[in-house]
Amino acid sequence: MKNFILIFAIIIAGLFSSCQEMNEDFLDAPAKSTLDESIIFSNAGLARGAVDGILEPMGQTNSYRGRFIPFYGFNTDTEWNYSSDDAGSSQGELMIYDAKPNNSQMNSTNNAWAMMYSGIERANICIRGLRSFGNPQPETELGQLLGEALTLRAIYYTDLMKTWGDVPARFEPINSETIYLEKSSRDIIYKQIIQDLEEASTLVAWPNETAATTSVERINKAFVKGLRARLAMVASGYMQYPDGIRRSNDPELSVEKMYKIALDECRSIISSGTAHLEPSFETFWRNYNEENTNAGSESLWEIPFAAGRGRVLFSFAVRHRGVDQYTGQPRGGIAGPLPTVFYDFDEADSRRDVSCVPYGWGTPANGVAQQELVGLDTWYFGKYRYEWMNRYVTSTNDDGVNKIFMRYAEILFIAAEAANELEGPAAAAPYLKEIRMRAFSPEFQAEKVDVYVNALSSKEAMFNALVKEHKYEFTGEMERKQSLIRWNMLKANLDEAKAKMIDLQNRTGDYADVPSTLYYKYEDDNETLNIYGLNRGENQDPGVEYSAFTWNPVFDEMINSIYKTGVNPDDRQFWPIWQVFIDGSNGKLVNDYGY
């Protein structure tokens, strides 16, 4: 009875607490409404509040805000969470491919699993109401709202399936006969949401085409098409099924069919001209931290957190050890790039120093902190920086910065991968060149872009280059894990990452010329480090004005905790369904994969 009441509480909250007008920040606490569905969904203003309410569950503490975003996506061949080597840690086991159903971080009735289904229920109510009472047509406000509701439901299912595999399929509001459902084949769900997104793309406007699509906090046609392309690639890719790792057996999800959908959608976005790469990689990330949410540039859609919600910088920013000139929230740094990643980049690649930061901000003196070097085994994601914000964050543990869900660079990657498979490397080359042109300044482009890409004359060579390029472009965005899974490269690349860290530890192999000592001084602002010795081969002492810093070795604990010893990551591609949901399912839910 307790679980019955809980489920119906979610239903009631989904309909009534979402029905309000929201301003720019959709995840603020919603006001209640007792209006009937026929009134709500025939009125664009009221329906707007209900559709905005679909996002509200993401802002709950144990949902995206405090559990899913901070912990999902680790560990990979490029990203590592610093709880991983904490023996017996409930957080750590989530990252080392050893999560248990009773994990104390996750095993609660208001966990992300429940909140995702709460969001789905809200979406189902909105979809039913708009279809029944709204006459949603293309180029109408109610049509835009139906497209948004379909897309938001697809987002929740996207994250449910990448995290748990097969899950219950709910595409209608819950009734007394559907309170308890068994898991459905993910193939069925993928086909449904790919179809839903095709419909949604006919209803929503392109970025900046209407007032509704001027912000990346609202759903637009470029994002819908991009998400459909991503899902087509995932649905046709490798993943763990209860009977092993394989591609789908469903002919409707074949590589040929799904890759064509993906390529067509990406080419539609590219030809529309409604989104593009920022000319500078650093400028894009500065704009992101400055909370520039204008549509029509590189970001396609972001989870919109209000100032009192969201822990993206709180989790992933360059570490600040005290209240200082840039933040009243001394946090960040729970994760970072593997120490090999910086040295895998080409030194001329402008993405390197943005993505990989070898310092944190030290203990402040009179409220002012300096950058301080950290050990070789501790790097931070430079894409997230309090010091690049326009706001001074004072909240205890929420920064309010949005989470990017998709950006235009991914469209170019998907186009390149699909074109390579269907049409060959020459068709993929222009998309890869566009990505690398942004990464390298003009004096390097002839060699690093044209010569490099033109030499990729086979499908295999182009594919392998795209796998590497994906790492350089997306380090710190936690997109890598699902990509490695769909490429059937998860364990192989994690093992390679371990081997590379051993070489770095011993200064052998590809890392033989990595310096053991760094030299530093402070710039005239007395807070910014000037570092010598980061690049390969910079081994000579630069002079007395610099101080020496021993570049600590990579420790065995870090290497061994990429994944737990004795565990095969390919057998643990998903988290288990948490025990509280198994127990409350009336015997309908079970865990697969040996959990």
Image (spheres, rainbow, N blue to C red):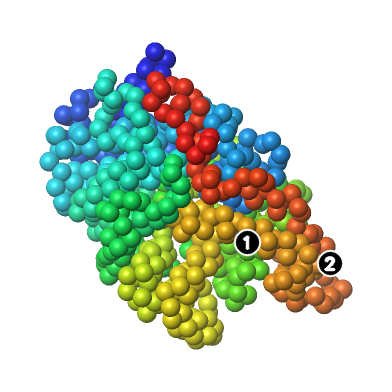
Amino acid at pointer 1: Glu
Closest to the camera, between mark 1 and mark 2, is: 1
Q: Residue at x 53, y 45 (%)?
A: 571
Q: Is residue 228 found left or right of 338 in the rendered image?
A: left
Q: Residue at x 19, y 37 (%)?
A: 130
Tell me the residue that label 1 is attached to.
496
**Can the viewer see residue 576?**
yes
Tell me the residue that label 2 is attached to.
547
Q: Is residue 17 found left or right of 483 in the rendered image?
A: left
Q: Residue at x 24, y 47 (%)?
A: 196
Q: Which residue lies most toward the front here?
A: 243
Amino acid at pointer 2: Ser
- Name the spot of residue 577 as percent of width and height, x first: 48, 33
Q: Secondary structure at mark 1?
A: helix
Q: Which residue lies most toward the right here?
A: 544
- Name the spot of residue 356 as percent of width and height, x first: 62, 62
Using the image as rendered, state which of residue 46 and residue 379 is in the foreground.
379
- Label 1–label 2 contact, CB within 8 A: no
Q: As displayed, is residue 401 above or below residue 587?
A: below
Give the quarter of the image for residue 566. top right
Q: As displayed, is residue 49 above or below residue 10?
A: below
In which quadrant will I find the N terminus? Answer: top left
User: Which numbered disc, 1 or 2, marks the residue that appears first in the sequence?
Assistant: 1
Mark 1 neighbour density, 10 Å: few (under 14) some (14–19) many (20 or more): few
Which label sits on residue 230?
A: none
- Name the spot of residue 127 as percent of width and height, x first: 23, 37
Using the image as rendered, state which of residue 261 and residue 56 is in the foreground.
261
Q: Which residue lies most toward the top here?
A: 1
Marks 1 and 2 sit apart, C-alpha to C-alpha, by 34 Å
Q: Is residue 111 found left or right of 328 in the rendered image?
A: left
Q: Residue at x 28, y 48 (%)?
A: 191
